[in-house]
Amino acid sequence: RRGEMAKATQLIDNEVFRAYATYAAIVLIKMMLMSLITAYFRMTRKAFANPEDTESFGKGESAKKYLRTDPDVERARRGHLNDLENIVPFVGIGLLYALSGPDLSTALLHFRIFTGARILHTFAYLIPLPQPGRGLSWAVGYSVTFSMAYKVLKTAWLL
Amino acid sequence: RRGEMAKATQLIDNEVFRAYATYAAIVLIKMMLMSLITAYFRMTRKAFANPEDTESFGKGESAKKYLRTDPDVERARRGHLNDLENIVPFVGIGLLYALSGPDLSTALLHFRIFTGARILHTFAYLIPLPQPGRGLSWAVGYSVTFSMAYKVLKTAWLL
Amino acid sequence: RRGEMAKATQLIDNEVFRAYATYAAIVLIKMMLMSLITAYFRMTRKAFANPEDTESFGKGESAKKYLRTDPDVERARRGHLNDLENIVPFVGIGLLYALSGPDLSTALLHFRIFTGARILHTFAYLIPLPQPGRGLSWAVGYSVTFSMAYKVLKTAWLL
């Protein structure tokens, strides 16, 4: 039993993998929080996508007017989708990168810049900040993921 | 060569990791089935997004009327997107959680509740069940993922 | 320190895992390129989703006309979403599959067919090719992921 445990915790004992686990959890939690922000705007702006979600506001025609889109809801949804498009590749490529044997300091640099850039991106999207604020924060995160992918392909390449 | 195999199958020999692999595969397959449900509604409701998809119904103007949205198609698509937003964090955080050395019984509890909640969520979305059916099943899965993220951060924390 | 490194690079020393890392990185990069294609169409078609993105085209009413949808932008976005729906399950199930101890040749067959099918799918979507070109390339990738999921569940099954 202890032997099994040792095997299971072996990866998590590695410092680069621990750093990866920390930052991957943080950006995935950040992405999940977009659901709460969307829900908040749906409630306060009374803008829903499903008839059954409007029933607490009355039956029939009086509830139908809440089946609508709202600029703040759509903005939060676009931010959430952008997270899916960018955080998912980071988590996938980041795992392979963490297993490709990078220096701890180089790995931390990648993970920290990506995480900072995505948090900035969310603020830039929701406030919203004038461009190129959101564009630049997106490009920084995007470039970090490419840099990790390059290291993965250089180390693992077996086509 | 056998040594390499042994290394490769080491993780899968761990019981917590085997449980993770089982439930992660199940919820990912469940998510993939949403594509078939959307395709079914697109065919039966004749509601498509791409001109080239309507060509079997005739050329030109007669086919254009099938380029439209349909409430059942959109409902299945929203269910699919909600799966992406919730199952992806579960798979990512769940992997790190499985490697953080939890008890098998605690891990199974997390995986089973999440999987059950997401299957309920799909039924609640597609039937549809009156609220708060869908909302509660969403919140249960969401909370399980947060609980696993807490364990990951407590074990791995290296910022 | 060297011992730690050895542990960290152990998985990446395994040939099946190296093949997985290579193809997973390739399809995730392919998915990320969809962002650039969408951005290209948004720029050339002048079709944006956020008011702050149109400000370089003038202030007020003159910029508002660029807040619109465009068929080419929407097509690229649908291709990107389809990648998320299909490449994410491949990356998740593929990781478990790579750890389930398949033969290298069988694993390579799965990874190569999936990757080829998804690259074809993108061309079929963007050109666009007449159906069933896009449908078939989608179905091939979908089937490969199911085949890997079957192997994972057969090997790991612990419910």
Image (spheres, coloured by chain):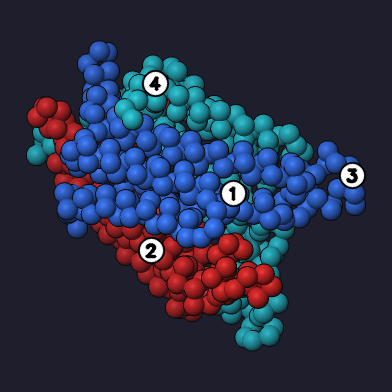
Chain colours: A blue, B cyan, C red
Q: Which residue is under mark 1?
A: A127
Answer left or right for C56 relative to A63: left
Q: Nearer the viewer, residue B115 or C51?
A: C51
Indicate which label's residue lies in the foreground, 1 or 4.
1
Chain under numbered label 1: A
In the current view of this chain or complex, which residue is farthest to the front? C59
Q: Which label's residue is closer to the chain start, 1 or 3?
A: 3
Residue at image point 55% right, 38% down: A33
Residue at image point 64% right, 86% down: B60
Split into 4 quadrants, where in the image is the N terminus of chain A?
Answer: top left
The image position of residue C30, as x and y in percent, is: 35, 61
The image position of residue C137, as x and y in percent, is: 41, 66
The image position of residue B34, as x and y in percent, is: 56, 51
Residues at marks 3 and 2, CA–CA distance in whole angstroms: 46 Å
State the mark number for residue B117.
Answer: none
Residues at marks 4 and 2, CA–CA distance in whole angstroms: 35 Å
Q: Which residue is under mark 3?
A: A59
Residue A27 shows up from this direction: yes
Three-letter code for the amino acid on which mark 4 is drawn: Lys
